[in-house]
Image: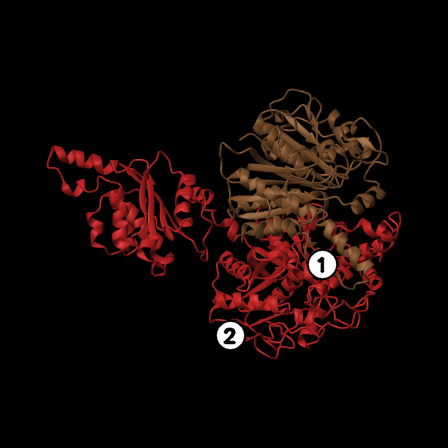
Chain colours: A red, B brown
């Protein structure tokens, strides 16, 4: 930010030139319009543009203003009465300014100058967007530079096809905000959302402390199926929560005939909310954003056995809460949350999407506090579903191992409590971390399989970093999606290889402890991710033996304490090509 | 930041898809279940894929593609769907096989397509759209949540053009179960006489309505989506009135400014008591329209109401199959509630 008020335009332009320590002999020859445009371009490009990534022909300039070169035209006309000035004459075309910028930078791409009454962001977005989309150019400086007597304004935008840290979407809306000096243009992007509480129940622990203890002693949660009657018992291991429905119900303080999915959700969500200890919660706008994949399917299975024999049979109570939303509603009611609730279901990325949707509700000023995460209980429906896909490992899973055979299904629930900056200030205890980046991108390749190069995973990770304003070197730990299926780990690994190049942070799949908890996994792993920051932990990837041939890195196999963990990336990918990455950062 | 409805497409129990004028002729059904009128899907979906797709996937994908065609936008920046029940046909089919085949020799297709985000995923796959893709599954609020998500994305500058849809399908099993749960009437009824009959239960429906929401003004836009609000379990009618007034004033409006209110009356005597009371208080003197006699009751039926409202504003008239009064609406309020638990307000205005 440089200010120099109460001076005329030539003095102002010179002071800008000097402030930025520019040295360019042509500057002194230019007219005011060219100086203004050229200076703006220098400031715009000095830190943010990697010119060497482009060919000169790939960089274009599309500018506009209302007065063309009228300012210099008038000066030239005045000079005509006396001695016509050739120096002024050459600047009586507005596109000379474009030439000045091109000469300085050796830009040779498409250029144009439009004269319009007002800055037309819609037109600019469309015109420049068209050039980029049709690959006429790959980068563009566009905007508005206008001078007439004492009135002047210059606003230039650097548009590139690839996202960079801190870049925002190129559209009319954002251009208008920048043009109108909206200093809040990045405010929403920058408004912090903090994690104030965590809660989890998984096969390795009935609360957060028990889960952490299991990590430290390397105790995985897989074993034989005990809670379901199925022909797959003793055939495939699963990672069950080590409590029966009756025990869960006592702990949750509700009836045990409700879905196990609801019981798990309530216990973990309540732990998170209690942990946050938000004073005057009732006076705040609070939401519950929860994810799951099959709702009350465990009870629906019981209903359908009777219903299929006779459509008038089957206990209606068992099917009443079949919908995914019923699980959320039942838990919200018991937590006393009424301001907002919703359920997200995007397969195995569901609760990662729930978390960043919750953060966006806070950033958009709709809510102050959001309990966000997800839940899923083991059901015959999902067990048989994954079995038909032939991606269940008959042994304990081996994520990111060359000889991995598939995933182990798990169950559980995990929630974090997200709070606005304002609420964060009222808390009497330290915050865990902040959610600094997030993205959902679609692989658009196949309903269940990931693309070989992990396009969706790559885009989600890269865009989440962009959102966080971070580069790959800032990430100190990746909590992998790492299901243990040949397809996922290969696609995810390939995407990491491409994004992180030769700078691979420690990474591991905590699914080697908890199994794949489907709609709960993003929530559970978000809890583990923020705990990694708070306690300086890196979790081990169990049973890893042989590096994958195609990958130049291996997962961390030891429990590490006392690490400096600034930023953690957590990946969750699901059916339907649904890929989500979250970035948590230390405060 | 304004959100505009660039285009809308709707598959429903009425002739809404291959439009022959806006609801000029209403299809009459006798019974308690209205089934969507299915178009010739071949014009919208690769015939090789149609065979494998369930009813809801076909409806959703075709409505989405038709909506994009109408909007002139080939590639949306985001795809968001709302569905309370998700892919019921595939879910029930897989569940039935598990039980009947005793967990052996199961084909995977039904499971693969049973996930709730299948419609949004199939649209992304068809378009090769790598952008944001989300699915809300919260009962009678699923579609409204999708709209709220889209409005936030536009407000954040994350996307310019967003494809948003509400989809739900009815299957024989779900119709039987929901009838047993008391949602639908016990006696057959004509949908055209739905509001004349004062009894318990409504009529079941289904459908898919998609919208292309844009941040860009265009003379071709159908309408502006001015605001969406949801509220949960209001304690009485006074609380509902407070919510409606607060919503209107947040949009710098009063109830007097509203030209038409589309309500979610569904023929169930208890359900409709809420609207009945409002028609004597806050909505007194307002022109009131119904829509569930046309599409039936289902949790994402508000997407049908939004389709209707946007088209009424664009056409500058309301079909007389919906209201008898002559009105050229500039501002339409859609007020719907689902089982008096989930209430939603949607404000649609002329651009």
**Residue closest to the eye, A121 or B318:** B318
In the image, is A154 to the left or to the right of A452?
left
Q: Earlier in the sequence, mark 2 or mark 1?
A: 1
Residue at the spot 84% in from the left edge and 54% down from the top edge: A303
Residue B273 point in image, percent of width and height = 79, 31
Q: Is residue B3 visible?
A: no
Chain letter, disc 1 residue? A
Residue B124 point in image, percent of width and height = 57, 51
Q: Going by the picture, which residue comes out furthest to the bottom?
A: A545
**Residue closest to the eye, A155 or B331:** B331
Chain letter, disc 2 residue? A
Circle 1: element type: strand
**Residue closest to the eye, A481 or A558:** A481
Residue at the spot 71% in from the left edge and 50% down from the top edge: B87
**Residue under numbered circle 2:** A552
Q: Is residue B94 visible?
A: yes
Residue at the spot 54% in from the left edge and 76% down from the top edge: A549
In the image, is A92 to the left or to the right of A56?
left
Residue A67 point in image, percent of width and height = 29, 35
**Residue under numbered circle 1:** A375
Residue A168 point in image, percent of width and height = 46, 51
Kindly report which numbered mark, 2 or 1, lies closer to the viewer in this rendering.
2
Q: Going by the picture, which residue comes out furthest to the left?
A: A83
**Cα distance in 3D space between marks 2 and 1:** 34 Å
Relative to A545, does residue A334 appear above or below in the rendering?
above
**Residue closest to the eye, B47 or B88:** B47
């Amino acid at each position: 930010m440089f200010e120099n008020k109460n001076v005329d335009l030539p003095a102002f332009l010179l002071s800008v030139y000097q402030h930025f320590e520019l040295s360019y002999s042509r500057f002194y020859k230019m007219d005011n319009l060219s100086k203004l445009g050229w200076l703006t371009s220098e400031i715009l490009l000095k830190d943010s543009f990697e010119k060497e990534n482009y060919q000169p022909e790939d960089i274009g300039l599309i500018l506009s203003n209302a007065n063309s070169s009228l300012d210099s035209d008038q000066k030239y006309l005045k000079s005509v009465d006396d001695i016509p000035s050739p120096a002024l004459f050459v600047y009586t075309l507005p596109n000379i300014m474009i030439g000045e910028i091109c000469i300085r930078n050796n830009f040779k791409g498409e250029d144009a100058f439009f004269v319009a009454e007002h800055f037309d962001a819609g037109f600019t977005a469309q015109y420049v967007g068209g050039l980029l989309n049709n690959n006429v150019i790959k980068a563009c400086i566009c905007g508005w530079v206008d001078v007439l007597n004492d009135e002047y304004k210059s606003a230039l935008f650097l548009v590139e096809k690839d996202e960079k840290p801190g870049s925002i979407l190129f559209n009319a809306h954002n251009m208008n905000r920048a043009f109108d000096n909206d200093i809040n243009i990045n405010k929403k992007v920058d408004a912090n959302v903090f994690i104030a509480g965590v809660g989890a129940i998984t096969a390795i622990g009935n609360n957060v402390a028990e889960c952490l203890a299991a990590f430290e002693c390397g105790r995985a949660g897989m074993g034989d199926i005990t809670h379901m009657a199925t022909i797959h018992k003793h055939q495939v291991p699963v990672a069950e929560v080590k409590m029966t429905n009756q025990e869960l119900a006592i702990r949750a303080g509700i009836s045990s005939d409700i879905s196990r999915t609801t019981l798990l959700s309530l216990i973990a969500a309540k732990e998170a909310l209690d942990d946050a200890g938000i004073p005057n919660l009732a006076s705040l706008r609070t939401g519950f954003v929860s994810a799951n994949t099959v709702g009350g399917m465990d009870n629906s299975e019981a209903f359908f056995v009777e219903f299929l024999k006779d459509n008038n049979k089957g206990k209606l109570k068992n099917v009443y809460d079949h919908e995914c939303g019923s699980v959320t509603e039942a838990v919200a009611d018991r937590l006393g949350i009424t301001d907002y609730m919703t359920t997200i279901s995007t397969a195995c990325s569901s609760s990662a999407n729930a978390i960043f949707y919750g953060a966006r509700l806070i950033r958009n000023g709709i809510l102050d506090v959001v309990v966000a995460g997800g839940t899923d209980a083991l059901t015959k429906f999902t067990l048989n579903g994954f079995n038909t896909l032939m991606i269940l490992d008959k042994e304990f899973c081996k994520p990111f191992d060359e000889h991995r055979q598939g995933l182990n299904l798990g169950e559980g629930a995990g929630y974090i409590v997200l709070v606005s900056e304002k609420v964060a200030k009222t808390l009497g205890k330290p915050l865990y971390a902040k959610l600094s980046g997030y993205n959902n991108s679609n692989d658009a390749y196949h309903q269940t399989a990931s693309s070989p190069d992990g396009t969706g995973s790559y885009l989600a990770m890269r865009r989440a970093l962009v959102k966080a304003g971070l580069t790959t070197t800032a990430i100190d730990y990746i909590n992998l999606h790492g299901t243990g299926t040949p397809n996922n780990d290969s696609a995810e690994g390939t995407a990491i290889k491409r994004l992180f190049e030769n700078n691979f942070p420690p990474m591991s799949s905590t699914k080697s402890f908890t199994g794949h908890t489907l709609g709960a996994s993003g929530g559970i792993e978000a809890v583990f991710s923020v705990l990694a920051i708070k306690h300086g932990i890196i979790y081990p990837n169990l049973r890893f033996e042989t590096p994958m041939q195609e990958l130049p890195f291996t997962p961390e196999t030891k429990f590490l304490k006392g690490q400096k963990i600034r930023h953690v990336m957590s990946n969750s990918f699901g059916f339907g090509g649904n890929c989500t990455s979250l970035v948590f950062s230390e405060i | 930041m304004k959100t505009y409805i660039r285009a809308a497409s709707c598959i429903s129990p009425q002739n809404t898809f291959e439009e022959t004028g806006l609801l000029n002729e209403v299809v009459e059904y006798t019974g308690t279940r209205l089934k969507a009128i299915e178009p010739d899907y071949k014009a919208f979906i690769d015939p090789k894929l149609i065979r494998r797709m369930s009813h809801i996937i076909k409806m959703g994908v075709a409505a989405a593609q038709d909506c994009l065609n109408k909007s002139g936008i080939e590639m949306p920046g985001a795809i968001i769907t709302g569905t309370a029940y998700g892919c019921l046909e595939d879910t029930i089919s897989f569940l039935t096989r598990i039980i009947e085949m005793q967990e052996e020799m199961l084909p995977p297709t039904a499971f693969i397509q049973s996930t709730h985000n299948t419609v949004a995923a199939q649209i992304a796959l068809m378009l090769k759209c790598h952008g944001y893709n989300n699915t809300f599954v919260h009962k009678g609020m699923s579609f409204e949540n999708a709209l709220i998500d889209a409005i936030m994305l536009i407000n954040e500058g994350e996307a310019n053009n967003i494809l948003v849809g509400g989809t739900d399908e009815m299957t024989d099993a779900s119709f039987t179960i929901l009838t047993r749960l008391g949602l639908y009437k016990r006696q057959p009824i004509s949908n055209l006489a739905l509001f004349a009959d004062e009894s318990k239960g409504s009529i079941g429906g289904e459908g898919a309505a998609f919208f292309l929401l844009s941040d860009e003004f265009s003379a071709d836009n159908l309408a502006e989506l001015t605001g969406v609000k949801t509220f949960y379990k209001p304690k009485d009618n006074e609380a509902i009135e407070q919510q409606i007034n607060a919503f209107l004033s947040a949009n710098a409006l009063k109830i007097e400014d509203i030209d038409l209110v589309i309500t979610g009356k569904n023929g169930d005597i208890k359900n409709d008591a809420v609207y009945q009371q409002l028609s004597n208080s806050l909505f007194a003197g307002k022109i009131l329209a119904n829509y569930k006699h046309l599409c039936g009751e289902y949790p994402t039926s508000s997407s049908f109401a939004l389709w209707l409202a946007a088209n009424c504003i664009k056409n500058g008239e309301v079909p007389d199959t919906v209201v008898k009064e002559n009105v050229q609406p500039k501002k339409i309020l859609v007020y719907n509630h689902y089982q008096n638990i989930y209430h939603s307000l949607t404000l649609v205005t002329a651009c």
